[in-house]
Amino acid sequence: MRGRKRRSQWVQRNCLVCGAEFTAKLQPARANRPGHGTCCSKPCQQTNMVRRKIAKQRATFAERFWARVDQSGGPGACWPWTGTKTKLGYGEVSLGNINWSAPRTAIELTSGPTNPSLIICHHCDNPPCCNPAHLYVGTPKQNSEDQQARGKLTLEERIKRRAA
């Protein structure tokens, strides 16, 4: 004799799709398969399969955002935004029908919501940078003072230079 054949078990379950109670036959060879014995009927099983496929494909907003940030330089380097950019070179991300600043999104994903009346400033002076270590929340006045202290051009001066 090679060994005893395992017998199937019958268990009471609730359907994942419609919630109906049903009796499922758990076969030992299939007991570890995902989705086995979780639905009461073929239509519910098909619905469940579609839901699982959609859940695999759907990434969260944060996952989609960070996938467009090049973090290959390490934690101390600039992390440039690789998605769409404004004319001034700042990253831009869409959520629904609204475009958001990529640096502001990076700050809000790591630190929580910010005051919309404040702006996101860069320590690194690199507009596409989304590294939260290089960004800080400040007023336009603080940003101008910071730029002047480092000998950088103001936004108006940069626009004039690009137009010329």
Image (cartoon, rainbow, N blue to C red):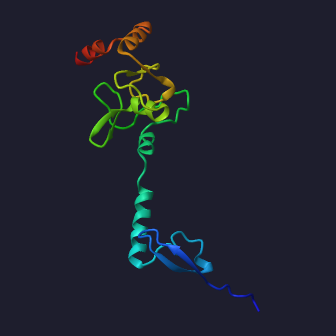
The residue at 44%/63% (across/down) is: 52
Residue 57 figure quarter: bottom left
Q: Is residue 39 above or below residue 120?
A: below
Whole-percent x, y for residue 29 in the image: 61, 79
Q: Is residue 32 left or right of residue 45?
A: right
Residue 160 figure quarter: top left
Q: Is residue 114 above or below residue 141?
A: below
Residue 65 figure quarter: top left
Residue found at the very far left of the displayed protein: 164
The residue at 32%/36% (across/down) is: 84
Residue found at the very far right of the displayed protein: 1
Residue closer to the observer: 103 or 72: 103
The residue at 49%/33% (across/down) is: 110
Residue closer to the observer: 158 or 144: 144
Q: Is residue 7 left or right of residue 63?
A: right
Whole-percent x, y for residue 96 in the image: 30, 43
Quadrant where the C terminus is found in the figure? top left
How many numbered discs sit on the rendered protein?
Answer: 0
Quadrant where the N terminus is found in the figure? bottom right
Whole-percent x, y for residue 81 in the image: 40, 34
The residue at 53%/69% (across/down) is: 34
Residue found at the very far bottom of the displayed protein: 1
Q: Is residue 76 above or below residue 69?
A: above
Whole-percent x, y for residue 85 in the image: 32, 32
